[in-house]
């Protein structure tokens, strides 16, 4: 049964309102391409109202600014409880609007409440320091919220992205305007309703569904927005950086995807390595920024590995994401479907060996077969560009030094992994690979305790981890004369 959709309007000042223009846009179920709701389409006029509300809520003596830090944390703990209460519904809604398989949505949302609690626990641990200057002066630092934050979300893990950005901004004491991705507005709106239930003062969080080119651009160019946190494409990340520079020097945190290498050494347990490699690239149909999309396999086990990888890819159960046993659901939309099929064609044209998959499944819903390419070369398009789909590209290598060199030959630097039973290999690789996250004998393992973000063009700044709140704070130095 389809989940009930309760919220489709714009959320400003704790009120549900229509778009100023009166416009709506359709949102879909990627499983069967059906329209599941009409959602208010916010653009510049609505962003202006939302930013004004967030600015009022951030005023010097506002209810939010006067709230004690521990009370901010407490509000977020309540929010986490409500997420847990509505766990089943949120997982269902995420799966329905995004195509995420139910088992993954369930796992993610159970992590989500813990993530909110971890970040909430930082709200009352924001500390400065004291610096005796010698002589007659001493200084101390205060860390203060940066102001109104624009939080621009991607469609791939909508609920978790909303929570990581919103919770961190709130723990810091900021206010926010959230722009969910146009493909997946529904869970963001459901979470806004839970924030009201948790007791958030009006205007502290506002959610404006709409398109990037209109609502997104208005937010990134708004003079009253002090900071943007964005997760999405490299292309848009660069536009946001430019907008920040051209306007009011907004602070930016950017998470822009990757082309992450996973290295399998000859000494690895083949059965284990094949499973991690498949998990690393086929999870969520490859629609994750940390996908293991360059799989480097050492020559001694290469042929056996390719065969085993094809078997694993073929064994994945494709079907309706609402079914608990489905392992492989649809891509998010038609644009992504066509983009990924285009990359698969390009792989074939440029001489990679298609081992399995490569085709669309059926003609309703955006399904693509889990696909494996072998004999991929570093200069092929499928080895260089982020595909964001279920495409495993296997490349052969001889030595660890060679593979580190090749792994680093990319503009991205989000994640990397190595599967090996040799400690020296693991240590050397972890130290020398250029990536914000390195996994050894595991892949995709993420918790709120660990800082996450990219080297190079994968982004700027870190989310999660004990310092995550700093991304939403300014440091103020106060210097006093002692006499
Ligand atoms: P996108 O970067 O265009 O969209 C992400 C968000 O940015 C959405 O909320 C969108 O409305 C907004 N946006 C778009 N243009 C904007 C602009 N000019 N100013 C402000 N906001 C804007 O990503 P898209 O088009 O959905 O996907 C393209 C590619 O991006 C994918 O193929 C994938 O490679 C990558 N991607 C990476 C993600 C990640 O986790 N790092 C998540 C989603 C996509
Ligand atoms: Mg785009």
Image (cartoon, rainbow, N blue to C red):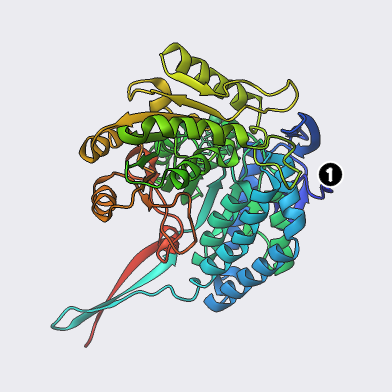
Residue 480 versus residue 455 in the image, above or below:
below
Name, please, the residue furthest toward the top.
Answer: 349
Q: Residue at x 77, y 30 (%)?
A: 32
Residue 79 versus residue 303 in the image, above or below:
below
Give the left or right position of residue 310, taking residue 92 as reference.
left
Name, please, the residue furthest toward the bottom.
Answer: 483
Q: Can you give x and y, in whole percent of width and height, for residue 400 in the image?
A: 24, 40
Residue that mark 1 sits on = 2
Q: Quadrant of residue 423?
A: bottom left
Q: Quadrant of residue 74?
A: bottom right
Name, please, the residue furthest toward the left.
Answer: 135
Q: Can you give x and y, in whole percent of width and height, for residue 179 in the image?
A: 61, 44
Of 415 and 324, the residue lying toward us: 324
Q: Residue at x 45, y 64 (%)?
A: 449
Give the left or right position of residue 419, taking residue 188 as reference.
left
Residue 159 versus residue 212 in the image, above or below:
below
Answer few, some or many: residues within 10 Å of disc 1's Cα (few below 14, many 20 plus, some between 14 and 19): few
Give the left or right position of residue 207, taking residue 126 as reference.
right
- SS label for mark 1: loop
Of 37 and 173, the residue lying toward us: 37
Q: Can you give x and y, in whole percent of width and height, for residue 203 in the image?
A: 65, 58
Q: Name the image quarter holding the C terminus.
A: bottom left
Of 297 and 324, the residue lying toward us: 297
Cβ at disc 1 under 8 Å from ligand 1: no
Q: Is residue 151 visible?
A: yes
Q: Name the image quarter holding the N terminus.
A: top right
Residue 83 versus residue 455 in the image, above or below:
below
Give the left or right position of residue 219, taking residue 42 as reference.
left
Q: Can you give x and y, in whole percent of width and height, for residue 362 in the image?
A: 72, 22
């Amino acid at each position: 049964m389809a989940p009930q959709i309760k919220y489709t309007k714009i959320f400003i000042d704790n009120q549900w309102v229509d778009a100023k223009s009166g416009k709506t846009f359709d949102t879909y179920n990627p499983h069967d391409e059906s329209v599941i709701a009409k959602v208010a389409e916010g653009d510049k006029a609505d962003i202006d109202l939302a930013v004004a509300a967030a600015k009022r809520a951030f005023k010097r003596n506002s209810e939010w600014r006067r709230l004690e830090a521990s009370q901010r944390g407490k509000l977020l703990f309540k929010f986490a409880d409500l997420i847990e209460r509505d766990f089943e519904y949120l997982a269902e809604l995420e799966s329905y609007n995004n195509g995420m398989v139910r088992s993954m949505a369930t796992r993610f949302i159970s992590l989500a409440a813990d993530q909110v609690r971890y970040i909430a626990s930082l709200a009352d641990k924001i500390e400065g320091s004291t610096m005796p200057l010698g002589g007659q002066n001493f200084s101390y630092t205060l860390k203060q919220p940066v102001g109104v934050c624009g939080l621009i979300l991607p469609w791939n893990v909508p609920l978790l992205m909303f929570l990581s950005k919103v919770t961190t901004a709130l723990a810091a004491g900021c206010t926010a305007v959230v722009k969910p991705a146009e493909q997946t507005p529904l869970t963001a709106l459901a979470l806004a309703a839970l924030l009201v239930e948790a007791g958030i003062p009006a205007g502290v969080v506002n959610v404006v569904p709409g398109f990037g080119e209109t609502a997104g651009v208005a937010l990134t160019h708004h003079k009253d927005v002090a900071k943007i946190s964005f997760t999405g494409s490299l292309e848009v990340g660069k536009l946001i950086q430019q907008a920040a520079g051209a306007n009011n020097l907004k602070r930016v945190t950017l998470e822009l995807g990757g082309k992450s290498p996973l290295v399998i050494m000859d000494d690895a347990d083949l059965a284990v390595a094949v499973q991690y490699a498949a998990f690393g690239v086929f999870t969520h149909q490859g629609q994750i920024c940390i996908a293991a999309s360059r799989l480097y396999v050492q020559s001694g086990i290469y042929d056996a590995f390719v065969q085993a990888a094809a078997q694993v890819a073929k064994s994945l159960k494709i079907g309706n994401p609402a079914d608990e046993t489905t392992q492989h659901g649809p891509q998010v939309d038609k644009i992504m479907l066509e983009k990924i099929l285009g990359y698969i064609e390009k792989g074939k044209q440029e001489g990679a060996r298609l081992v399995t998959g490569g085709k669309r499944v059926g003609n309703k819903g955006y399904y693509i077969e889990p696909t494996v390419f072998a004999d991929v070369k570093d200069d092929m398009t499928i080895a260089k560009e982020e595909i964001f789909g279920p495409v495993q590209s296997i490349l052969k290598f001889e030595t660890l030094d060679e593979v580190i060199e090749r792994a680093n030959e990319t503009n991205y630097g989000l994640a990397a992994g190595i599967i090996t039973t040799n400690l020296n290999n693991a240590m050397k690789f972890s130290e020398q690979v250029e990536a914000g996250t390195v996994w050894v004998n595991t892949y995709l393992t993420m918790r709120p305790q660990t800082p996450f973000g990219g080297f190079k063009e994968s982004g700027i700044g870190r989310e999660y981890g004990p310092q995550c709140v700093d991304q939403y704070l300014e440091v103020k130095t106060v210097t006093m004369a002692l006499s």
